[in-house]
Amino acid sequence: DHVIVITEGPEGVLWVGTDKGGVNEFNIQTQSFTAYKLTSPGDSPGNADRDTVTSLLGVTAGPPGPGKNSSFILWVGTRGGIYTFHRKTGEFKRWNLDPGNNTPLCSNHVVSIYEDHSHTLWIGTKDGRLMQFNHKKQGFILHPFDPDFPPCGADIGVRSIFEEENTKDLWIGTTGAGLYVRESRSGIWYNYRKQRGIATSLSSNDIYSIYRDRGGITWIGTEDGLNKIDTIKNEFVHW
């Protein structure tokens, strides 16, 4: 009964991620639910981490085809890894998050999924990893954004990922380390944190959401209230 995340798909469908209950498909037209447990070849049965869904993202794979949701793919982030669900076949596929290159993978706990303007998929993990999906190699690439993080990122979760529409800058909201912004032109990362005694800094280093409204204002949801960012002055207003 514990709902963690909801996202909307085509054909009047809502996808609901639950705590230990897998993914649920809610058909708005028929007002009915269909429950799916996350199982893929090689998975052990009854895995509570796998069936605890922490993030969802629906993407369209190519041009629409015949049949309900035939081109719709659901990316499912869980405490036990990341899966894709193909609505056309009704099957889950588990993806390997190991980036290779002797880089340790300390956690399979995925807490955020985001698709940018170029349809590049980004995922964030509970141990402070930012990873990009490589479509050619069909695998994930590690993108370090703070060289001071320990090998496993401690308990610094990448909770929110956002791309600025005009500049294409990538914004990363973390729990414990504030806000990171990668300038698209230079590739340089900038870090914004709560600073004691400075009223125009972030109100908290624990960030859970980033949202740009229709007026072009960026809002940051934190552990200690809502922040509005002035991108000209690089200052934050607390609400």
Image: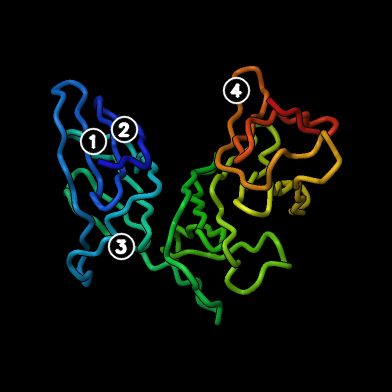
User: What residue sits right under mark 1 in the picture?
Assistant: 69
User: What residue sits right under mark 4 in the picture?
Assistant: 213
Q: Relative to the observer, which residue lies in front, 162 or 66?
A: 162
Q: Quadrant of the C terminus?
A: top right
Earlier sequence position, callout 4 versus callout 2: 2
Q: Nearer the viewer, mark 4 or mark 2?
A: 4
Q: What type is the residue that disc 2 sits on?
A: Gly
Earlier sequence position, callout 4 versus callout 1: 1
Q: Mark 4–mark 3 contact, CB under 8 Å?
A: no
Q: What type is the residue that disc 4 sits on?
A: Asp
Earlier sequence position, callout 3 versus callout 2: 2
Q: What type is the residue that disc 3 sits on?
A: Arg
Q: CA distance from mark 3 to mark 2?
A: 20 Å
Q: CA distance from mark 3 to mark 1?
A: 20 Å
Instruction: Specify the color scheme.
Output: rainbow
Q: Residue at x 60, y 51 (%)?
A: 175
Q: What type is the residue that disc 1 sits on?
A: Asn
Q: Mark 4–mark 1 contact, CB under 8 Å?
A: no
User: What residue sits right under mark 3 in the picture?
Assistant: 94
Q: Residue at x 56, y 53 (%)?
A: 158
Measuring from the top left, give residue 1's x and y in whole percent.
Answer: 24, 41
Q: Going by the image, does 194 lie left or right of 103?
A: right
Q: Mark 3–mark 1 contact, CB under 8 Å?
A: no
Q: Mark 4–mark 2 contact, CB under 8 Å?
A: no
Earlier sequence position, callout 1 versus callout 2: 2
Earlier sequence position, callout 4 versus callout 3: 3
Q: Is residue 150 above or below residue 166?
A: below
Earlier sequence position, callout 3 versus callout 1: 1
Q: Mark 3–mark 2 contact, CB under 8 Å?
A: no
